Amino acid sequence: MTPPEEAQLRILRIVEEAPQISQRQLAERLGASLGKTNYLLKALLDKGYIKAGNFLRAEDKLKYVYLLTPEGIHAKLRLTRDYLARKEQEYIAMKEEIDHMRAELGVDNHHR
């Protein structure tokens, strides 16, 4: 999974949890600039993974809302599966390396 795909997955997950999140808040949660966040959101909108709309709040102010589309839900599941598979492979490789280092040091792998 490429870094942009990881960012897209994070956005899809955040938007699903907090559809009324502002771009500024989203940027903060991503640890990205507002410009990059806007770019990533636009890409997700262009792919049809999310849709954006306005609604009127009680204070008569327009508030933006982001919603996952059915395509976005499928994309989130696919990206999550890919991310999980990659992290599991990294975990296995890291565990093998740790076990090897422990064996080099003569440390029992079952005691920590």
Image (cartoon, rainbow, N blue to C red):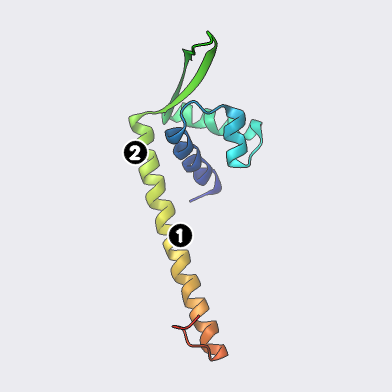
User: Does 71 sit left or right of 57 as displayed?
Assistant: left
Task: Identify the element where label 1 is drawn.
Answer: helix
Against 28, is 88 above or below? below
Which residue is most to the bottom?
A: 106
Image quadrant assignment for residue 78: top left
Q: Position of residue 31 (x, y in %)?
A: 63, 42
The residue type indicated by label 1 comes to: Lys
At label 1, counting other C-alpha atoms closer than 10 Å, the crowd grade (few under 14, some 14-19, many 20 or more) is: few
Q: Position of residue 67 (x, y in %)?
A: 42, 27
Against 1, is 55 above or below? above
Residue positioned 62% across, 37% down in the render: 28
The residue type indicated by label 2 comes to: His
Task: Identify the element where label 2 is drawn.
Answer: helix
Q: Position of residue 64 (x, y in %)?
A: 51, 19
Choose between 49 and 25: the one closer to the eye. Answer: 25
Q: Which mark is residue 44?
A: none
Residue positioned 33% across, 31% down in the render: 70
Which residue lies under the disc numbered 2? 74
How much space separates mark 1 and mark 2, taking CA atoms? 20 Å
Which residue lies under the disc numbered 1? 87
Image quadrant assignment for residue 40: top right
User: Does 75 sit left or right of 2 as displayed?
Assistant: left
Q: Position of residue 102 (x, y in %)?
A: 53, 84
Against 40, is 31 above or below? below
